[in-house]
Image: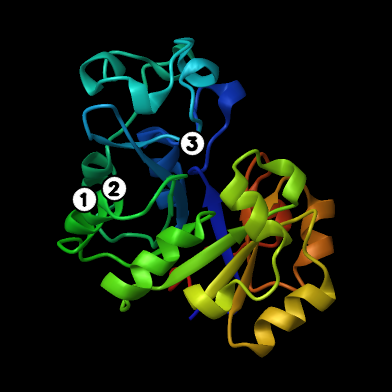
């Protein structure tokens, strides 16, 4: 177990220097340092499991279409930020990582859980590396509690104003949501996490991760009250990382 976890948000990326977020190149950079990787899984119109953060393809590829309404045949031709990197599939990422570092997998699903999650865990059940799973959607965690209780699950939380999804917004405002979903960890927005909130989660046996740490100031604010940081746009060495390998939890 790590005394403290440093997790590379969307891989160890630098969009300005030709290493796009959630690209195979960004994951290779993280693997070289033995860093756990956070990544986002969402589905295309024809059910392909992609690693991509945004709902829209526009910011990262220039195509002004939603991922959920676009078929994979069109998406696989796109390039990330005009580099030679393309949007990877879940299969491609699992093959690349191959257990060399732990994965923190965020399921991007704002609707009823079941269909997408079943397909994701069909892939993961044959994966021999370490992984844990998180989501903003409590319905995803509740589905996991019922169907894959052996998988470590975590609830993402942020300030209510940072999301437009009504289900997610309700969860941001609620207290005690974890009584139903029973997460083993909380991943909390750096702007929301306080010592008091962290203590309340830890008293209930949950680990607390903080996202997204973007500079040393964020790190100083959170490292004493969290079990690890999910970081980007800052070198891991700037926030006290020492190269080591081990578990996320």
Q: Is residue 176 left or right of residue 26?
A: right
Which-is-in-front pick, marks 3 and 2? Answer: 2
Front residue of this view, candidates 221 and 178: 178
Contact between marks 1 and 2 (CB within 8 A): the answer is yes
Q: Quarter of the image holding residue 222?
A: bottom right
The x, y position of residue 238, in whole percent, is: 72, 52
Q: In this view, does 104 lie to the left or right of 94?
A: right
Residue at disc 2, secondary structure: helix
At a point 60% along the width and 51% down the height, the residue shown is 168
Which-is-in-front pick, marks 3 and 1? Answer: 1
Contact between marks 3 and 2 (CB within 8 A): the answer is no
At a point 27% along the width and 71% down the height, the residue shown is 147
145 vs 62: above or below: below
13 vs 221: above or below: above
Q: In this view, does 122 lie to the left or right of 120?
A: left
Question: In the rendered image, is residue 129 in sight?
Answer: yes
155 vs 49: above or below: below
On residue 119, which mark appears?
1
Q: Quarter of the image holding residue 122?
A: bottom left
Quickly name the residue at label 2: 116
Estimate how packed mark 1 is, as few (under 14), some (14 to 19) or many (20 or more) residues with alpha carbons within 10 Å. some
At a point 67% along the width and 79% down the height, the residue shown is 201
Quickly name the residue at label 3: 53
Question: In the rendered image, is residue 244 in sight?
Answer: no
* Gap between marks 1 and 2 measured at Cα: 5 Å
Contact between marks 3 and 1 (CB within 8 A): the answer is no
At a point 28% along the width and 27% down the height, the residue shown is 45
* Gap between marks 3 and 2 measured at Cα: 16 Å
On residue 61, which mark appears?
none
């Amino acid at each position: 177990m790590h005394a403290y976890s440093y997790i590379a948000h969307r891989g160890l990326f630098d969009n300005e220097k030709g290493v796009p977020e959630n690209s195979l190149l960004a994951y290779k950079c993280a693997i070289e340092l033995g860093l756990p990787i956070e990544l986002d899984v969402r589905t295309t119109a024809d059910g392909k499991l992609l690693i991509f953060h945004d709902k829209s393809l526009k910011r990262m590829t220039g195509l002004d279409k939603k991922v959920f309404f676009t078929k994979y045949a069109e998406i696989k031709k796109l390039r990330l930020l005009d580099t030679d990197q393309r949007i990877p599939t879940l299969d491609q990422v699992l093959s690349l990582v191959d257990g060399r570092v732990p994965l923190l997998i965020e399921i991007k699903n704002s609707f009823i859980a079941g269909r997408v999650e079943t397909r994701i865990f069909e892939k993961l059940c044959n994966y021999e590396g370490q992984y844990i799973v998180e989501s903003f959607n409590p319905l995803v965690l509740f589905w996991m509690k019922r169907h894959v209780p052996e998988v470590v699950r975590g609830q993402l939380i942020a300030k209510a104003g940072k999301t437009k999804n009504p289900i997610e917004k309700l969860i941001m405002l609620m207290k005690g949501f974890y009584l139903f979903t029973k997460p083993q960890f909380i991943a909390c927005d750096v702007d929301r996490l306080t010592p008091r909130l962290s203590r309340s989660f830890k008293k209930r046996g949950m680990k607390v991760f903080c996202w997204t740490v973007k500079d040393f100031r964020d790190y100083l604010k959170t490292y004493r009250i969290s079990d690890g940081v999910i970081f980007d746009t800052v070198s891991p060495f700037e926030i006290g990382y020492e190269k080591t390998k081990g578990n996320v939890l």
